[in-house]
C-alpha cells in the first residue's frame, strides 16, 4: 500500500475571524498557532506517523507557499511533503493536488487540514477498508435528533439509524477519484466532499468507518479551547507511554 495524502489548505476560513498574525493573512484557520505550531503542521505530523503514507501534498494559496516551505524545512519531515497551488474552491484545490501525486500511489487520502486530532488507529482502519473496497470515509453517528425544516418549520424528524456525519480522511483508489473529478467538471457539479463526487459514478459503494467525535474540524474561535485541551491530553498520553 502506497498512500498519498492530500491536505487542501487554500481556504480563507472566514468563520475564524481576524485573530491570526499578519504574515498568515487575516482569516486562515489552518495557520492558527496551537502549542507553538500551526494547526496545519500538527495535521501533517499525524499522517507522517502512519507507515503506509509515502507522501503528503498540501494545496495552498500562492502567497502562502514561501513561508510554508520554510516551515517544512525547519520541520525536516521523514517523508516527502510537497506543495501545490490550490484553487478558488476546495474541489479545485484537491483536483490540483491529485494531478501531482506519485505515479505508484495505490490510495489517495483527502483530509481537512484543520482536523489535527485524527487518531492514528482510525487512519489505519479507513486505509484498510479502502484497500478492500476502493472507497471509504470516516464518519460518526449523530447523537442529536435531526429535523428537516422549511422556513423554520419542522417538516420531518429523520431517523438517525441510517445517518452518518461525514469526516475525513476520505480515501479512494486514484482512478476512481480522477474519474469522479473529471465527471464533476463535465457536469459543472460541485460536491460538499470527495465522497459525493465518487458516489455519482455509481461504480463502487463508499464504505463508512466509524471515527471519533474528537476528530473535530477547527472552524471557529471557540474550537481552539477544545483543541488546546485535546493537544494537552495527547501530550500526556505520549509522556505516560
Image: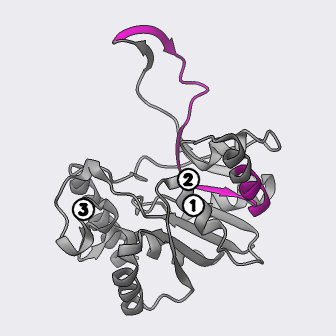
Say left or right for 199 vs 77.
Answer: right
Front in this rendered view, residue 121 or 97: 97
Query: Tag 3: Cα neighbours inside 10 Å, few (<14), some, or many (≥20)?
Result: few
65 vs 137: above or below: below
Was residue 179 drawn as part of the magenta stretch in this picture? yes
Q: Mark 3 points at which residue?
A: 228
Who's the residue at 18% across and 71% down the image? 22
Front in this rendered view, residue 10 or 63: 63
Q: Quadrant of the C terminus?
A: bottom left
Magenta residue span: 152-180
- Which label sits in the foreground, 1 or 3? 1
- Which label sits in the foreground, 3 or 2? 2
User: Which comes before the other along the chain, label 1 or label 3?
Assistant: 1
Q: Disc 1 and disc 3: Cα gap in Å?
A: 28 Å
Question: Residue 176, image x and y in percent?
Answer: 77, 55
Do the numbered discs 1 and 3 sit on residues whose CB atoms are within 8 Å?
A: no
Query: Tag 1: Cα neighbours inside 10 Å, few (<14), some, or many (≥20)?
Result: many
Amino acid at each position: 500500500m502506497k498512500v498519498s495524502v492530500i491536505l487542501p489548505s487554500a481556504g480563507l476560513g472566514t468563520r475564524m475571524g481576524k485573530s491570526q498574525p499578519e504574515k498568515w493573512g487575516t482569516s486562515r484557520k489552518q495557520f492558527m498557532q496551537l502549542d507553538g505550531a500551526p494547526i496545519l503542521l500538527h495535521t501533517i505530523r499525524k499522517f507522517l506517523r502512519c507507515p503506509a503514507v509515502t507522501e503528503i501534498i498540501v494545496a495552498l494559496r500562492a502567497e502562502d507557499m514561501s513561508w510554508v516551505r520554510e516551515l517544512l524545512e525547519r520541520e525536516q519531515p521523514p517523508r516527502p511533503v510537497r506543495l501545490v497551488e490550490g484553487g478558488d474552491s476546495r474541489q479545485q484545490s484537491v483536483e490540483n493536488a491529485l494531478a501531482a501525486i506519485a505515479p505508484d500511489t495505490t490510495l489517495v487520502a483527502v483530509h481537512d487540514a484543520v482536523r489535527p486530532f485524527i487518531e492514528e488507529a482510525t487512519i489505519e482502519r479507513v486505509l484498510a477498508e479502502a484497500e478492500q473496497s476502493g472507497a471509504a470515509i470516516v464518519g460518526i453517528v449523530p447523537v442529536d435528533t435531526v429535523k428537516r425544516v422549511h422556513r423554520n418549520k419542522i417538516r420531518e424528524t429523520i431517523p438517525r439509524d441510517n445517518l452518518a456525519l461525514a469526516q475525513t480522511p476520505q480515501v479512494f483508489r486514484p482512478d476512481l477519484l480522477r474519474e469522479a473529478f473529471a465527471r464533476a467538471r463535465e457536469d459543472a457539479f460541485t460536491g460538499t466532499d470527495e465522497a459525493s463526487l465518487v458516489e455519482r459514478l455509481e461504480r463502487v459503494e463508499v464504505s463508512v468507518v466509524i471515527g471519533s467525535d474528537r476528530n473535530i474540524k477547527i472552524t471557529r474561535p471557540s474550537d481552539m479551547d477544545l483543541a488546546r485541551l485535546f493537544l494537552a491530553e495527547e501530550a500526556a498520553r505520549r509522556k505516560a507511554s
